[in-house]
Image (cartoon, grey):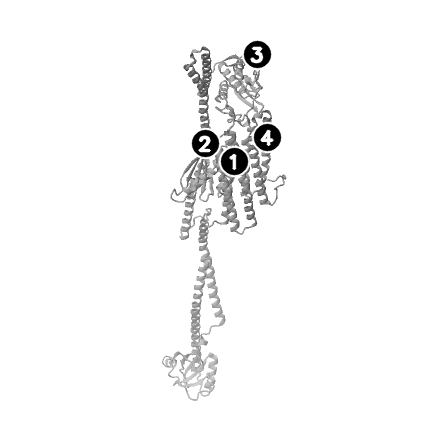
Amino acid sequence: MKLRHRLLLALVGVGALVAAIGSVVLVSLMRDAVETAFVEDLRSRTSRVVEQLESDPPGGQVLAERAEQLAAALNARVTLLDREARVVADSQAETQPTVPFAAGAQPDVRQARSRGWGSSRGPCETHDGPCFRLTRRVDAPGTIGFLRVGVPIDRIRALPAAHLTEAILVLAGTLTLIVALSYLGFRLLSKPIERVTECAERLGTGDLACVIPHQGEDEVARLRRALMQVREFMIDRIEDLEGSRALLDSVIASMQEGVLVVDASRKMRLANDSFREIFGIMRQAVEGRGVTDIVRHPDLLAMIDEGLSTGEARQGRIADLAGRGRTFEIEVAPLAGGASHPTDGVVVTLFDVTRIDRLEKTRRDFVANVSHELRTPLTSVKAAAATLLGSELDDPVMARRFLETINRHSERMAELVSDLADLSLIETGGLKLEPEPIDVSVLARDAMRQLEPRYAGKELTTEIDMPEPFTVRVDRRRFEQILVNLLDNGMKFNSQGGTIAVRGRPGDGSRGMGGPILAVEDTGRGIPEDSLEKVFERFHRVDPGAAAERGTGLGLSIVRHLVHLHGGRIRVSSELGKGSRFVIELPESAG
Amino acid sequence: MERSFETQLEDLSTLIQRMGGHVEQAIGSAVQSLVDRDPDLARQVIQQDRQIDQLELDADAHVLHVLARYQLAARDLRFLTTAMKILPDLERIGDQAVNVAERALELLDEAPLPLVVDLPRSANKAREMVRQVLDAFVHRDAEAARAVIAMDDDLDEWTRSMFHDLLAHMTKEPSLINRAMRLAFVAKYFERMGDQATNIAEQVVFMVEGTVLKHARNFEDD
């Protein structure tokens, strides 16, 4: 029950009690007042009556009549007593007393005898209840010595109904007013308490919006102030926590590594942006879903299982993790507990090592390739030299043949080493070009001539399609190297009986970079679209499973570097099965 | 200590997803072993097919357990019976991957073919279909299942075009026939994977909508 209602109830209770007692007391007091007034009035009227009697004393039979008269005048029982206090007339007696009743012993009579008047209360002869008696000595000649008047006390003390009703109404009215005003007062008091309570309840549910302004200095005000302080405290703490949380969130979100948290029941709890990018789940909700919903790779699942059951960290590398060919370094670390308790979950970190992996593979391939490329000619050289040293030195014809073999293979090795040196020089920025006006048509012809013997078996048609002379400002040696590499490529991958062409156009400011344009075209097997950009990478092989290609895979890489050093650019276009076309665009300054 | 019914269903979904993961890995490794001429990888694929088979048995047993143990509502009953129907299809996809690995091993004995045939493209498509169809099943998504069925068209077309190319080469260069035929088989295996994934997709559509798509495309019995 509400506070103010309880107070009200208490007040009403107390009020009722007060009213009860009060009314009893009040009524009693009123009756007393009425009695006193009556008695006074009776005394004065009795006095006048006695004066009358004294001036006109009655005698004989008239006494009885007189008594009745007096009784009517006084509205009370009148008893006339003689000087010996014996009753001689009684207004109330049916018959006049034959045996005189001596009332001398009555206190009021004795008082009257000595003082002139007296009063007493005693039992009524003709009534239930007590009576009030007033007696006056009559000082006059005649029979009558005393006048005794008697009234039942309950008649004296009777309150007129109107007064009683009035009194009760006033009392009731006053009490009601008190209760009402008090209730208002309680409300005034309990309102602030109610507000504070409401606010406290709202704070309890986490609603921090409640603010009560400061008012007054009583206990409620103190409570109010304290509550507001609690609210301030909560707001500060929450802000701090949210700040830390936001910091952590942004750190995790910005991490390059993919992060996934998996709980003990193999449900995902958190996945950062990098993780989402890796698995292509940018917008999906992750919280609460089973980990196999997203992660299916058996090896990764095995790592997570192990991490969850042993509580120990695990590392591993997994290739082609999310179906798009990327390789990842993975760490699975327990969240809490360590090796001795069951873990709360694990944190999975994914680091993309695709490039590193590829670079490592490239390096391995390169080393393998170079050793292979060197070993083959070296074997021949060694064999030839061994044979020469063994026996053939004496036969000049045979000796010459073997020496030619040695020479040829040495050439080949020299080429390879030269390529390597060039590439290294270019990549470290040590290569300096010396451009001068060169007739490229002559260069092209020389290059073709140089390579034809190597590919005689393919029966290729050669074509040189450019102005003669075609003067371009380039470094002679390096540009020859470009042409030789491109032609070598074009012929190596050409089909039997195909065509290899070199075309050139002078620069006219409108195409490419504004300078001269050269193209090398072949009718070979072509390059797949997704490899087009990669052909210029070092050691790239279009079809690694295909017949072992001669060369180190460096040629095109060197070509591109050299073209860039000339300030130009090189593009390739191709159609599988039809052929490829390499286009060099030079700047205007070369034209 | 028995896990709740909900958890049992989740466990089944997880088992099937794991099995799917193994199958995806098998497809990827098989095609890679072919392209890289890697005998160890090929052998690994063949070996690990056992795990796929084991997972099929486990999942099957799990389904039977749940069927026996619980009084099921229609929806859950359909989920479980569909699971039973798709498990063999999934296992067969794994078998196709083994076939690819076996052809890869055979090809290693001979010189590499001077041909470029984009088998990885088909392999990736098949993998995608496996992944997406299992997602559709676990999430009871008929629309996603239909999308998988549509993906099969690409696979069929690529297979046709690869056959065409291989045939052309074989006609021009009879010495290639032996090796080219094997590549043709491999192309076919990926196409079969697509078909099986499509079967699964049809089951999923039926499970969710009650629409029968089975046998609607052609009259050949699988």
How far across and down, in percent of the image, does residue A198 sit? 46, 51
Viewer-proximal residue among A224 and A434: A434
Q: Amino acid at mark 3?
A: Glu
Q: Whole-Å distance between the Cαs marked 2 and 3? A: 52 Å
What numbered label is drawn on residue A468? 3
Disc 1: which residue: B98
- Asked if badges 2 and 3 are on one and the same chain, I answer yes
* Magenta range: B94-98
- Read off the residue under disc 2: A353
**Vertical position of residue A111 compared to residue A346: above or below:** below
Residue type, label 4: Phe
* Marks 2 and 4 in Cβ contact (< 8 Å): no
Disc number lying in front (1 or 3): 1
- Identify residue for label 4: B163
Query: SS for tag 4?
Result: helix
Cβ atoms under marks 4 and 1 closer than 8 Å = no
Measure how far apart labels 2 and 1 are at the Cα level: 29 Å
| Kind of residue at badge 1 | Val
Q: Chain of mark 2?
A: A
Q: Is residue B96 magenta?
A: yes
